[in-house]
């Protein structure tokens, strides 16, 4: 059994430091790894990233994350990534890694992802250069996730994104903003590999549970949705 703790959209700044830490200190007793589904900060500043590092660094379990749209806001992504890396937090973007757990080898592949919408109501690569560029970003991100997932040699495989790969977990959000909360291409990428679980954030008013067209379980772990420091998932024969 592999035990995964996960949360997203913690939006840490100086005033949040210490809020999650008491629960996080208990992680070695209940999880093999902590996955963070982006929007670690409020505005993507280096100072905020150092706050994230204080809150989520040195936990006694590997911490793996993707960035979210908030983490890009101030164009300080290299500084944000370095502040996290300095305390051993791994940032994935079209990349993956394997963690040796007592219950087996866990592979985690991640990208931030991007918007675009879902089957029947999605953006298309047609028309103005700006629209083509938008969809190109969506496709590139999904392609990178698919390559990373298929490139991992592991016992159990998890996809980690900020944007949603399915509309199921967006239920509760206004329909008008679905195209800005995720894309079907991410779901296709997840279905292109033997993925056991897909985790995302971003949809604060969304729903926790969903499934890709290929049957992969999807969980929205945004903090406003799960309403706790993290959720725990057990990967064995069945997801718990």
Image (cartoon, helix red, strand yellow):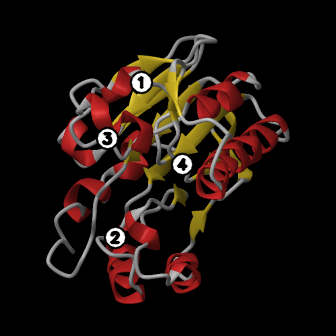
Q: Is residue 43 above or below residue 123?
A: below
Look at mark 3 in the image and give the residue it sits on. 203
Q: Earlier in the sequence, mark 2 or mark 3?
A: 2
The image quadrant of residue 158 is top right
Q: Is residue 129 above or below residue 196?
A: below
Dot 3 falls on a residue whose secondary structure is loop
Is residue 84 depicted above or below 22 in this figure?
below
Per the image, label 1 sits on a secondary structure element best described as loop
Please name whichever residue, 29 or 149, is drawn nearer the observer in this view of the structure: 149
Q: CA distance from mark 1 to mark 4?
A: 14 Å
Q: Circle 2: is it few (<14), some (14-19), or many (20+) Cα within 10 Å?
A: many
Residue placed at 75% from the left, 37% from the top?
146
Provide the residue designation for mark 4: 114
Callout 4–callout 2 Cβ contact below 8 Å: no
Residue 234 percent location from the top left of the image: 47, 26
Q: Residue at x 28, y 59 (%)?
A: 10
Q: CA distance from mark 4 to mark 2?
A: 18 Å
| Residue 40, image quadrant | bottom left
Q: Which residue is mark 2?
A: 41
Tell me if 90 is positioned left or right of 227 in this view.
right
């Amino acid at each position: 059994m592999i035990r995964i703790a996960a949360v997203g959209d913690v939006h840490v700044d100086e005033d949040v430091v210490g809020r999650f830490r008491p629960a996080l200190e208990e992680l070695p007793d209940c999880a093999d790894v902590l996955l963070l589904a982006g929007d670690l900060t409020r505005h993507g500043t280096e100072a905020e990233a150092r706050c994230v590092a204080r809150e989520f660094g040195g936990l006694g379990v590997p911490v793996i994350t993707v960035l979210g749209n908030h983490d890009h806001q101030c164009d300080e992504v290299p500084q944000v990534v370095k502040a996290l890396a300095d305390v051993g937090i791994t940032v994935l973007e079209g990349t993956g890694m394997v963690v040796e757990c007592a219950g087996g080898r866990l592979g985690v592949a991640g990208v931030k992802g991007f918007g675009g919408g879902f089957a029947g109501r999605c953006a298309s690569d047609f028309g103005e250069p700006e629209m083509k560029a938008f969809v190109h970003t969506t496709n590139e991100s999904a392609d990178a996730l698919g390559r990373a997932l298929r490139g991992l040699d592991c016992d159990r495989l998890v996809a980690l994104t900020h944007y949603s790969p399915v509309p199921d977990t967006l239920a509760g959000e206004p329909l008008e903003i679905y195209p800005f909360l995720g894309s079907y291409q991410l779901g296709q990428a997840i279905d292109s590999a033997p993925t056991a679980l897909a985790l995302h954030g971003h949809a604060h008013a969304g729903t926790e549970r969903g499934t890709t067209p290929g049957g992969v379980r999807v969980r929205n772990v945004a903090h406003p949705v799960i309403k706790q420091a993290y959720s725990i998932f057990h990967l064995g024969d069945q997801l718990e």
